[in-house]
Structures are given as structure tokens and as C-alpha cells.
């Protein structure tokens, strides 16, 4: 793992899959149509250190 705090660059942002957690919360709030809300999935960002090339993906 890289120890630097500066020099990071975001290289990719994506959304993936069906989020069961999101669907359950949305269905509790708005009922059955909320199950469709899980289709939005989780947002993921990939960051790379410009100094050493270390890469990490964070799920938001």
C-alpha cells in the first residue's frame, strides 16, 4: 500500500450490479416500487498514485 497522501488521480468511476441493501431501504420507504431502486447499484471509484502506481478501488 502506498503511504503518500498527495498525488492521487481518479481514473475510473463506475456503477455496478444490483444493490440489495438499497432496494430493501427503498421498499421500506415507498413500498414495492422501491425494489427497483436497487438497480442503481453501488458507485465505485478507482484511484492511482502518480508516484508509485498503486491502484485502489473504493465502493461508495
Image (cartoon, grey):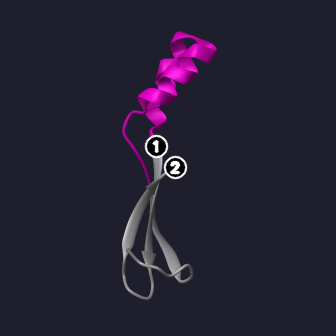
Query: Would you say the residues marked 1 and 2 are in contact, meaning their CB atoms lie under 8 Å apart?
Result: yes
Q: Position of residue 23 (x, y in %)?
A: 48, 24
Range of magenta residues: 14-42
Give the side of residue 46 with respect to residue 27, left or right. left
Question: Of the numbered discs in the image, which one, if any, rests on residue 6?
Answer: none
Could you tell me which secondary element the residue under label 2 belongs to?
A: loop
Query: What residue is drawn where x is 53% and y is 83%?
Result: 7
Outermost residue toward the top in this view: 31
From the viewer's side, name the closer residue of 5 and 28.
5
From the viewer's side, name the closer residue of 26 and 40.
26
- Per the picture, the main secondary structure of the magenta-coloured stretch is helix
**CA separation in Å, label 1 and label 2:** 6 Å
- Figure quadrant of the N terminus: bottom left
Q: Position of residue 60 (x, y in %)?
A: 51, 49
Q: Position of residue 17 (x, y in %)?
A: 36, 39
Q: According to the image, label 2 marks what residue?
A: 60
Q: According to the image, label 1 marks what residue?
A: 42
Query: What residue is drawn where x is 41% and y is 78%?
Result: 2
Give the side of residue 19 with respect to residue 30, left or right. left
From the viewer's side, name the closer residue of 25 and 18.
25
For label 1, count other residues whose C-alpha is less than 10 Å away and answer few (under 14), some (14-19) or many (20+).
some
Outermost residue toward the bottom in this view: 51
As drawn, 58 above or below 8? above
Query: What residue is drawn where x is 55% and y is 78%?
Result: 5
Q: Indicate whether residue 10 is drawn in magenta.
A: no
For label 2, count other residues whose C-alpha is less than 10 Å away and answer few (under 14), some (14-19) or many (20+).
few
Outermost residue toward the right in this view: 29
Query: What residue is drawn where x is 55% and y is 23%?
Result: 25
As drawn, 48 above or below 43? below
Amino acid at each position: 500500500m502506498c503511504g503518500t497522501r498527495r498525488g492521487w488521480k481518479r481514473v475510473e468511476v463506475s456503477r455496478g450490479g444490483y444493490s440489495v441493501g438499497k432496494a430493501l431501504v427503498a421498499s421500506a420507504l415507498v413500498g414495492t416500487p422501491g425494489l427497483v431502486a436497487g438497480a442503481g447499484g453501488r458507485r465505485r471509484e478507482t484511484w492511482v498514485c502518480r508516484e508509485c502506481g498503486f491502484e485502489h478501488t473504493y465502493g461508495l
